[in-house]
Image (spheres, rainbow, N blue to C red):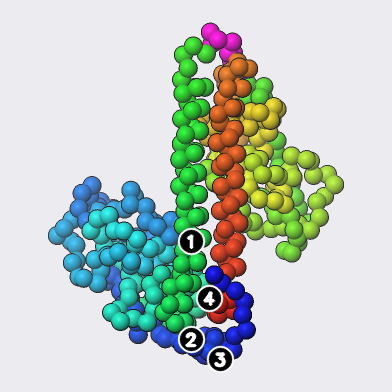
Amino acid sequence: MSTEIATKFKSTEIGLIPHGWSVCKLQENILIKGRIGWKGLKKSEYLDDGFAIINGLQFGNDEIDWKTVGRISKDRYDESPEIMLKDGDILMTKDGTIGKLAYINKLPEPATVASGVFVIRNNKNSILNQDFLFHYFHSDYFKNLVYSRIEGAVIPHLYQRDINELFVPVPPLHEQKQIAEILSAIEDKIKLNRKINFNLEKLGGLLFKQWIVDDEQKLQDGWKIGKVSDLIRVESGFPFHSSMFDENGNYKLVTIKNVQDGFFVPECTDSLSEIPSKVPTHCRLNNGDILLSLTGNVGRVCFVYGENYLLNQRVANLVPIDENNRAFTYFLFRQKDFQNTLIGISRGTAQQNLSPIETKSLEIPIPSQDMLDRFADVANPIFQKLVENYNEIKNLSTLRDLLLPRLMNGKIRVK
C-alpha cells in the first residue's frame, strides 16, 4: 500500500530525499562490468550452436528475445565469472542507444554479453535491492544523469567509470522491496496483457486463414470474387499544416511513425488544440479504428487505442462498411500474403507509396453473408479483447510512470 504522508526531507547529492534514507554510489554496492574487445566480431563468426551472446538488439520490453540471440564458438567464449550471466542480472546498453534495459529473470542457457552491454549485479551484503535498482534505472532522474555523461558524436558511448560514480537513493531495505513489489505488479500485468494479445493475434489470424483463405468450398457456397471496396472503405488522413500545431494541444496527431506492424504507438510528436472544421469524421479516431501505412514501410496495419487522436495524411483509416465486419477487416489486412500484395502494388524509388484507390480495387474473395456473420461472432470478441488489453496496458503504463518518480524520491511512501 502506498500513500502520500507527511515526510521530512533532507538535501543530498541527488536532491531532497526523506530522512531515514541515504545515498550511495553505484560502485559501492553493485558490480558493473562491460566486456572489453569483440568489437570486430563479424556476423560470419556467429554459429547456429554454441554460447549465446547478447547485444542490445535483443532487448525488448525489458526482456531478452532469446530466439534472436547470436551464438559464438566455445573457443572464443571468455568464462570470466563477471560476464557469465546469472539470474537477477540487469543488462544495460552502453553504445549507440544508451540505457536500454533487460532483466534476467530466469536464465534459460549459458550466455554472455557483447561489448556494448553492461552487466549489473549486486555485491554480497549490498544495501540495494536488485529489483528496486532495476526500477530506479527506469526513472527520469537516472536517465538524465546517464545522458549527461554520454560521450561521442557519431556513436554515443557510456563509460563504466561514469556509471560507477552515479548516486542512488537508498531507502530502508524493506521499503525498497515494497516499492519494487508495487512497480513489479504493474509490470507483470502489462507483460501478461502483451502475452495474451500475442496469442489472440495468432488465434484471430489462424481463424481467418482457415475459414476465409483455405476453404476450398467457398465458391460453391455463395461466395464470390469482389473488391476490397465491397466491404471496406480506405479513407486517407487529413493534410494538417504545421501552423496548426500546438505543443499543449489535447488532440494528438497520428502519423506514419505511429503505425507499426501489428501495434500502435500511442505517443505522438505533434498535437492540436482545435480540430479544423474541414477535417472529415474518419480522421477523428476512436478505439478500434484500423490504420494502414501508405508511405515508406507500406502495408503495416494496427488499431488505435486511446482517445483524442487525429489522423494525418499518408495513413489510411480502414472503415468496414458494415461494423460487424471490423475483425474481418483487421485480420484480412494482417495476413502476410495480403501485406505482400500491398507492397507489390506500391510505387516509388526513394520511398514506396501505396495508393488508397488501388488498395480498395484489389480483388478478394467475398464470403457469403452467413460466413461473414459466423466469423464475426467468433472474431469480433477477439478483436475487442485486443483493444481492451492495449487500453489497459496504456493506463497501467501511465500509472507506473506517475508512481515511479514519486516512489523513488519519497514523495509517496509505502506503508
Residue 385 percent location from the top left of the image: 57, 41
User: Which callout, 3 or 1, points to the residue nearer the camera?
Assistant: 1
Q: Could you say which disc has been placed on residue 45 in the image?
A: none
> Considering the numbered disc 3 on the image, is that residue within a helix, a strand or a loop?
strand
Q: What number of labels is visible?
A: 4
Give yes or no for contact between labels 3 and 4 (Cβ–Cβ under 8 Å): no
Q: Please name the residue that numbered disc 2 is placed on.
A: 21
Left or right of residue 338: residue 361? right
Callout 4 environment at 10 Å: few (<14), some (14 to 19), or many (20+)? few
Disc nearer the start of the sequence (3/4): 3
Residue 185 percent location from the top left of the image: 48, 61
The answer to which image quadrant residue 114 occupies is bottom left
For the residue pair 13 and 188, the one nearer the viewer reads as 188
Q: Please name the residue that numbered disc 1 is placed on.
A: 185
Give yes or no for contact between labels 2 and 3 (Cβ–Cβ under 8 Å): no
As for residue 172 lying within the magenta part, the answer is no
Q: Residue at left 56%, top 47%?
A: 389
Separation of disc 3 and disc 1 at Cα? 30 Å
Separation of disc 2 and disc 1 at Cα? 24 Å
Separation of disc 2 and disc 4 at Cα? 15 Å
Q: Please name the residue that numbered disc 3 is placed on.
A: 10
Callout 1 environment at 10 Å: few (<14), some (14 to 19), or many (20+)? few
Q: Residue at left 60%, top 45%?
A: 388
Identify residue type, mark 2: Trp
Q: Could you say which disc has been placed on residue 415 in the image?
A: 4
Q: Is residue 257 visible?
A: no
- On screen, residue 404 above or below 392: below
Q: Residue at left 79%, top 44%?
A: 279
